Image (cartoon, helix red, strand yellow):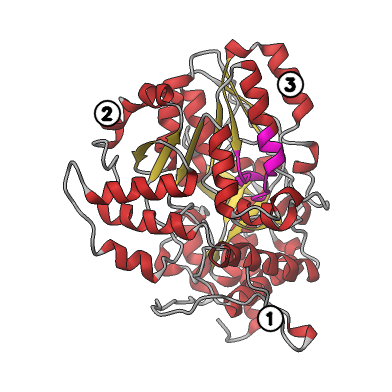
């Protein structure tokens, strides 16, 4: 990876190792219009229309900028239903990048989760993971299973200097397997890195230990590699054992010890689609029948062929540190800027995006009034920046209907790769700082329409009181005629 330093020490900023060749016009609405739009969206940033958003930082899934080689590859796609050369090229790319023998295509990552749950989770079984992801947990509980989280205690501390906060608690994992019995565990899933606790990475050493424990106990080991690109960057830059390994060496090592690897290509490879890969033919055969049932024929699995070509090229580009470094470096810059401003952030900076600690910023708002969602609406009102609630709203209720309060109340400001300029990142930090300085104006939210499943996607809330109007009025007073 290239190291570029500026002559003036005070001007050190991330250097993009790419140039922009296609642009898309953005629109920034006046604050009064932003207030109107968030209310129309039921105070759910997912329900905002993109035309009303200036910086879309809700996710990095499927919104990353593709490379020129990916776009070019899409023009040679072979759209044959069966026997497609596009499929053959994708197989070769997966073999090259992961070193695996078998591949099942799906339309995206949660389709992989559905198939894993359908195949291996039976009522009463447990699935152990470092930390859950929303759709993963929903598929497992839908099949009658339960999720047990085993991230190390440091993982849910907002700020510390632990480089791999997503690691499994190894002693606890061993003890839990002993207590539950291996036959009652559907699989152990490693999420690298951990989405809901700040995109925090997992070390290679920790993953190898988990895989070995699974092997010793006859339990399936599963790696969710959707966020592996950022995790690879952190392993290369933070872990001694990875310093002299190539990116390909690390990926081959992981795939060789895991029973199953799956990923969303909307994240890993900056394309569309998903994949389940393995070196175990028996496991692949158990899942194979679900592909034509749920996804499509075995040579496309619900993917459009141009996306498959982009996925093949994107996977190869994942081996290039120049490509995979830009995201973590921009995220680090945003976290550092906000930290300098005094805004409570999850540290160290992880992958996926910068994570604002809404629970610390808004201690006057209880969990059941959705402090993270309230902060996300305030950030949109202040800057047209669309972040995502990652707190209690993103959890699902307990079986008895009571609320399951999140360990951390966060607002995720995702940083889509190669999309934003540094000035836009600085603008985002500036507006979040303004929100932080006016945090006492922010109030809570209450449910207006609460779906029973994945409520954070399309539920609607309403503010408690008129705090949003007061916030917009304060913005206008502070910024005058500025957008």
Q: Check disc 1 and report its element: helix, strand or loop.
A: helix
Could you say which quadrant of the image residue 13 lies in? bottom right
x and y percentages locating residue 91 in the rendered image? 35, 45
Residue 193 among those drawn in magenta: yes
Identified at 43% across, 58% down, the residue is: 314
Q: Earlier in the sequence, mark 1 or mark 2?
A: 2
The residue that mark 3 highlights is 174
**Bounds of the magenta span?**
191-208
Quadrant (top left, top right, bottom left, bottom right) of the C terminus: bottom right
Vertical placement of 434 versus 165: above or below? below
Identified at 62% across, 22% down, the residue is: 215
Q: Earlier in the sequence, mark 1 or mark 3?
A: 3
Mark 1 vs mark 3, foreground winner is 3
Q: How many residues crowd mark 3 within 10 Å: few (<14), some (14–19), many (20+)?
A: some
Identified at 29% across, 39% down, the residue is: 301
x and y percentages locating residue 396 in the rendered image? 57, 33
Residue furthest to the right: 160
The residue that mark 2 highlights is 293
The residue that mark 1 highlights is 478
* Distance (Cα) linking label 1 and label 3: 56 Å
Judge whether residue 234 can be spotted in this image: yes
x and y percentages locating residue 403 in the rendered image? 63, 31
Mark 3 vs mark 2, foreground winner is 3
């Amino acid at each position: 990876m290239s190291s570029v330093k500026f002559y003036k020490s005070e001007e050190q900023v991330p250097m993009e190792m790419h140039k922009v060749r296609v642009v898309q016009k953005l629109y920034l609405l006046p604050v009064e219009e932003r207030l109107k739009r968030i209310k129309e969206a039921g105070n759910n940033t997912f329900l905002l229309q993109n035309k009303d958003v200036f910086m879309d930082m809700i996710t990095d899934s499927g919104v990353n900028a593709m490379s020129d080689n990916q776009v070019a590859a899409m023009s040679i796609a072979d759209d044959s239903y069966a026997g497609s050369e596009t499929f053959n090229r994708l197989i070769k790319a997966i073999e090259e990048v992961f070193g695996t023998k078998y591949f099942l295509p799906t339309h995206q990552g949660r389709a992989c989760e559905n198939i894993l749950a359908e195949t291996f989770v039976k009522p009463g079984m447990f699935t152990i993971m470092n930390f859950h992801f929303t759709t993963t947990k929903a598929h497992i509980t839908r099949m009658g299973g339960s999720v047990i989280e085993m991230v190390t205690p440091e993982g849910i501390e907002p700020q510390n200097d632990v480089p791999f906060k997503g690691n499994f608690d190894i002693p606890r994992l061993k003890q839990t397997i002993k207590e539950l019995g291996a036959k009652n565990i559907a699989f152990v899933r490693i999420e690298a890195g951990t989405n809901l606790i700040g995109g925090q990475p997992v070390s290679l050493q920790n993953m190898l230990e988990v895989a070995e424990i699974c092997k010793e106990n006859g339990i399936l080991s599963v790696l969710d590699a959707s966020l592996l690109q950022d995790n690879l960057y952190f392993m290369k830059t933070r872990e001694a054992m990875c310093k002299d390994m190539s990116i390909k060496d690390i990926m081959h090592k992981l795939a060789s010890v895991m029973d199953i690897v799956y990923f969303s290509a909307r994240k890993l490879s900056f394309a569309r689609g998903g994949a389940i890969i393995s070196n175990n033919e028996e496991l692949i055969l158990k899942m194979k029948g679900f592909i034509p049932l749920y996804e499509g024929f075995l040579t496309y699995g619900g993917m459009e062929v141009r996306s498959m070509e982009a996925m093949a090229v994107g996977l190869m580009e994942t081996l290039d540190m120049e490509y995979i470094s830009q995201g973590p470096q921009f995220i680090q810059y945003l976290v550092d800027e906000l930290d300098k401003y005094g805004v409570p952030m999850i540290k160290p900076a992880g992958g996926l995006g910068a994570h604002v600690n809404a629970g610390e910023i808004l201690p006057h708002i209880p969990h059941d009034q959705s402090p993270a969602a309230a902060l996300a609406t305030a950030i949109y009102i202040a800057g047209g920046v669309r972040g995502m609630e990652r707190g209690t709203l993103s959890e699902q209720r307990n079986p008895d209907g009571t609320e399951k309060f999140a360990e951390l109340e966060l607002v995720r400001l995702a940083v889509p790769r190669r999309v934003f300029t540094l000035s836009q990142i600085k603008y985002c930090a500036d507006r979040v700082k303004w929100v932080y300085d006016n945090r006492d104006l922010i109030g809570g939210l209450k449910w207006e329409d609460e779906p029973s499943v994945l409520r954070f996607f399309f539920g609607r809330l309403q503010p408690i009181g008129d705090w949003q109007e007061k916030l917009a009025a304060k913005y206008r007073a502070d910024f005058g005629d500025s957008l």
